[in-house]
Amino acid sequence: MAKVTIAIPTYWTWGMGKSIPSGDTIYDHPTPLDQSGTLARLLESLKVIDYSDFNIVVLTAATNSSLVKAAASKVNGIIERFNDSFQIMQFAPHNLKILRQHLKKLDLGDHIIQISLCGYPNVRNVQLIITHVLGSDVMVGLDDDEIVTDKGYLNKAVEFIGKEKDGNFVGGVAGLYLDRQGNYELSEKERGRKEKESNLFIRKEVIMDDAILSLERNSNRLVETPFVFGGNMVIHRNVFEKVAFDPYITRGEDVDYLINGRMLGCHFFLDKDLQIVHLPPKPTPCTDYFKLKQDVIRFIYERYKLSIAKAYLGFKAIAPEELDPYPGCFLRKNVENHALEALNWVRPGDIGETLSLEEFVAAANQYAQQVSHKYFRFQKEWGKIMKIIERDTGIRKYLMSLMLS
């Protein structure tokens, strides 16, 4: 039986009604500290799981450094209620500080800076590090706005991982998101509203829906996939020891991880029977705009990474067409035109910004060229970092001491 670590990031922000300071880290829907949030609901649902060898790591992040103590206290109060049910621990910024102190002794240099609980990809990398140090064979990533209803969920998660499919090692497995009604497709109303649009970014949900449907038409349960969902994602040790999340990606770090893996020869598959229920809060118009801006930066950056990957030893050239329909269609030459059009449509009228939209898109291209080499350098060192960390018994003892049961 494979040893599994379930990694659950949880994001917290200011209380309701509090104005958000500029410079706060942007997450899709962090929980206000004066609300109970959804973490307990997810943990309660995990009691249904019929699998013996697993532990749970809850990673706590906050939108502002002044909130980290309150967030850690809040999360501790939640997970304490489950210490009789699971082997469970919280990893919060104060734990990260201690981990970094250990890492400094291991002469990891500048790479310690990238081990952080600030931003989606950095949190995901900490997930990988903790899973690695705990000696688990598999990391299962869930998000705190989900529930698991299938008692065989973990058995399905490990069923194919680490085996071969059509001659390829199954290094990563993704599952599906179901909505409240048990559907994974867009509603007819939502699809009808967007599928007539010609703009890629406005049609994004329809394009993703089409990607899922194209895989569904394959009669096999396990199908190689060009996309994954980070909140229902299974990664084998052989992959997370080798492939890091890109610290410089703005959002969509899950799909970006697949792209990074593909450039390094790893294969990811969709298991149609691996399902969770996704219950996100309703987004606000302002949230939609900032998510769109991050998507623009992300796709321009990923396109540039793919264009230069073959210049780096060990990386394979991946054509956007190999990632069709999603995210491939966002990685082509015309994405800037679609970006400008969508930003003009979605931008709230009362928002004040220093850059024009044209300047913003130009800055996104500049960002891609400035940081891509940093990613390739970080990725080159990731395997060395993981080997060094694995050999340090002090880090393992510290993390094991955080387990509540």
Image (cartoon, rainbow, N blue to C red):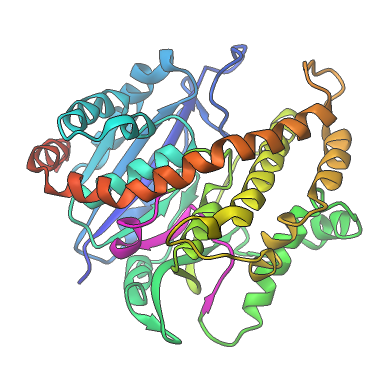
Residue 284 in picture, x, y percent from top left: 71, 32
Residue 60, by quadrant, is top left
Residue 85 in picture, x, y percent from top left: 22, 49
157 shown above or below 312 = below
In the rendered structure, does residue 243 fall within the stretch colored magenta? yes
Residue at 68 percent across and 42 percent down: it is 295
Residue at 59 percent across and 53 percent down: it is 308
180 shown above or below 31 = below
Query: Is residue 246 at all visible to an observer of this figure?
Result: no
Q: Quadrant of the C terminus?
A: top left
| Along the viewing direction, whichever of 154 and 46 lies nearer the viewer | 154
Query: Is residue 1 at all visible to an observer of this figure?
Result: yes
On the rendered structure, is 142 left or right of 329?
left
In the rendered structure, does residue 97 fall within the stretch colored magenta? no
Residue 214, by quadrant, is bottom right
Residue 389, by quadrant, is top left
The number of discs equals 0
Residue 205 in picture, x, y percent from top left: 73, 55
Residue at 35 percent across and 37 percent down: it is 59
On the rendered structure, is 292 left or right of 336?
left
Which span is picked out in magenta?
223-244
Residue at 21 percent across and 51 percent down: it is 387
